[in-house]
Structure formats: C-alpha cells, structure tokens
Image (spheres, rainbow, N blue to C red):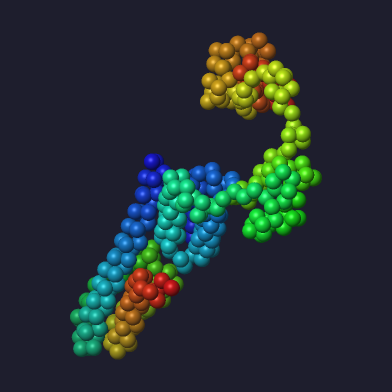
Amino acid sequence: MKRIVIAAVCLVLAVFLAVFGFWDLKKITEELHDSAERVIAAAEAEDGQTAESELDIFLTKFAKHKKMLGAFVNHGELDEADILVRGLQDKAVQGEFTELAEDLRTLQYHFAHLHDTETPRFENIF
Amino acid sequence: MLVTLCRTVILYVLVLLTFRILGKRQVGELQPADLVITLLLSEILVIPMQDTQIPLINTFIPVLVLIGLEILISVVSIKSIKFRNLLQGNSLIVIRNGVLDQKQLKRLRFTVDDLLEALRKKDIFDIAEVQYAIVETDGTLSVLLKPPYRAPQAQALHAQENNDGIPCVVISDGRIIQSDFKECGMSPPKLEKLLRSKNIEVKNIMLMTVDKSGNTNIIQKEDEK
C-alpha cells in the first residue's frame, strides 16, 4: 500500500509539474507578448515617452518572469532573448524606434516559440 | 562550473533517493523492466548533469514518471500472473535428466558454450550429472544435481546439527550494536558481564559476534592488543 501511495504521489507530482509548467509558460509568454506589443505600438507611433514607460513595464515583467522561464525552458533560448532585452533600453533612449520595434518583434517570435515548442502536439512529441 | 557542481550534487541525491524508493531488486538481479528503468535513469540523469542549458525540471518529471510506473508495474506484476509472465517471461528448463533441451536453448538464443560456461561457474563440468537446469527470468541458471552428485545433507547422514542461528554482530568498531541483541539472546547487562569476565573494553573491540548458543568471537583492534 505504501508503495502504491509513493507511485501515486510521484505520478501526480510529475503531472502537476508538467501541467503547471506548461500553463505558467503560456501565461508568462502571452503577458510578455502583449506588453511588447504595447511598446511596439508606441515606438511605431514614435511616441518616445509612452514607448519608454511601456518598455519599463516590459523590462520589469521580463526580469520578474526570467527565473520561472529558466526553470522550464532551455537556457540557450532564454539567453538569446535576454541579449535582445538588454539592448532595448539604449535604443529607446537614443530614439531608435524602428530598431526597437524590430527587436521587440523578434522577442515576440522568441516568446511564441518558447510556448510553441512545449505544446504537446504531434510534431513536438515525435 | 559551480552550476555543474550544484546540479551534480542534486542529481546524485536524486539517484540515491530513486534507487532507495525502487528497492533492493534494482541493485541485485535485474528483470527486463528493472534493466530498462536503470538504463533510462542513467541516461536521463547524465545529460543534464553536463548540459547546464537543460532545466532540471526536465529531469525531475521523467524520473518521477519512471518511479511511479516502475512501482505500479511491480504492484500489478505481484497481483497478476499473466501480466508478470508477459513482462518478465517464464523460467525455462534447458536440461532434463542430463539431456539438453535444444528447442528451449534455441528459444533463449543460448549457445551450448554459454550453458556449459554457466554450469562450470557452478562447479559442474558434466551435463550428465544434472537432473534439472533452469534459466531464470533474470538470465541466471539454477541447477539441481542428480541425487548421487548432490552434497550430502546432515539429515541424510543422520548427523546431529546444532542450531546456533546466525552469529549476530554485537560490537562493531568499538560501538555496541543493539539492533540484533534479541536475535542472539543478548542484553546490555549480559554483554557487560561477558566483557568484564574477558577483561576487555568495548572501545578496544573491532568485531564481536555472538550466536544463539552463546558462542562468542572477539577480534580486538590491532593497536589495542
């Protein structure tokens, strides 16, 4: 009986970690995607003030979620996103809105990809 | 480097806990399912130990699933004979009354050389001496010799045998081991009295064993003699 309980606990914990990880990853990547979208909109409108304030929000969110993302996705992919994020602030300050929007679009692709590769679809499983 | 060190420590503890949960069977004889689990675990754990790009959670989840499945499979195997046979196969008799069962050998993909080697490892050099040889599900060979070749038992010789039980370790490396006291009819006052009569202190004893009949064997520490 004790062993069945251990087996049940292990399986439930594994399923919980997998489902929680996937759900959290989806939530985080969607949140970052939306936040980046707001910065892009301001950058494309060349509204420097809004772009900077939205970028601050985006950077705060990214810093907050980085730890959780590191626990669930391949660190290499996260490092690529991190390098792009580090350059965003300078571009906003220097008024390079086109480059800023481009980098954020690339980041949006990264976030979508992080979630996409973890989705249990046929092509991902096999 | 420090990340690798931390991950190695975490994964080492994880392996120890896993094998503790899976039990002694995993370390001793390996059934097919046990072998699969052992191989998978070693692969799953080695890769993230060296590749720090892989999140540790990607290791924990498969390890938890494998532990869960292994325990469930062993529980179902205990309950269902059909499932056990499906998973582990059956023991097969390969020698009957000194005659090789070639059909079974072919089925097992055992060569005669393999069989002879396994017999020699059991100190049997002539197939004719064997009454039954059985290949167990874990691949080991069990042999029953024909009556004339079996070692005589005390019962057959009508010999009186003392039932002294297993000698229990009561002192190991200068420390009293009380867990086996009951098994060998020992108690702390009895031990104290015994050591006083031999004029030896506990700290000077490397090993002391006692059997049910009270026979003792004391090995003193070399530098204390």
Q: Quadrant of the C terminus of chain B?
A: top right
Relative vertical location of residue B40 with respect to residue B161 in this rendering, above or below: below
Q: Is residue A92 left or right of residue B82?
A: left
Return the residue nearer the eye: B183 or B84: B84
The vertical placement of B225 against B115, above or below, is above
Q: Residue B96: x, y in percent?
A: 69, 46
- Which one is in front, B54 or B215? B215
Look at 36% across and 77% down and name the residue there: A113
Up-down: is B107 above or below B19?
Answer: below
Quick check: can you spot residue B44?
Answer: yes
B39 left or right, relative to B55? right
Q: Residue B219: image x %, image y %?
A: 70, 24
Residue lying farthest to the right in this orientation? B125
Q: Residue at x 67, y 13 (%)?
A: B199
Residue closest to the eye, B5 or B22: B22
Measuring from the top left, give residue A11's x and y in whole percent: 37, 54
* Residue B145, x across and y down, in percent: 72, 39
Q: Residue at x 58, y 20 (%)?
A: B184
Q: Nearer the viewer, residue B166 or A25?
A: B166
Left/right placement of residue A75 relative to residue B106 reads left
* Residue sitting at x 41%, y 58%: B61
Residue B104: quadrant of the picture? bottom right
- Determine if residue A86 is in view: no
Instruction: Say how many tags the image has.
Output: 0
**Residue B153 occupies which quadrant of the picture?**
top right
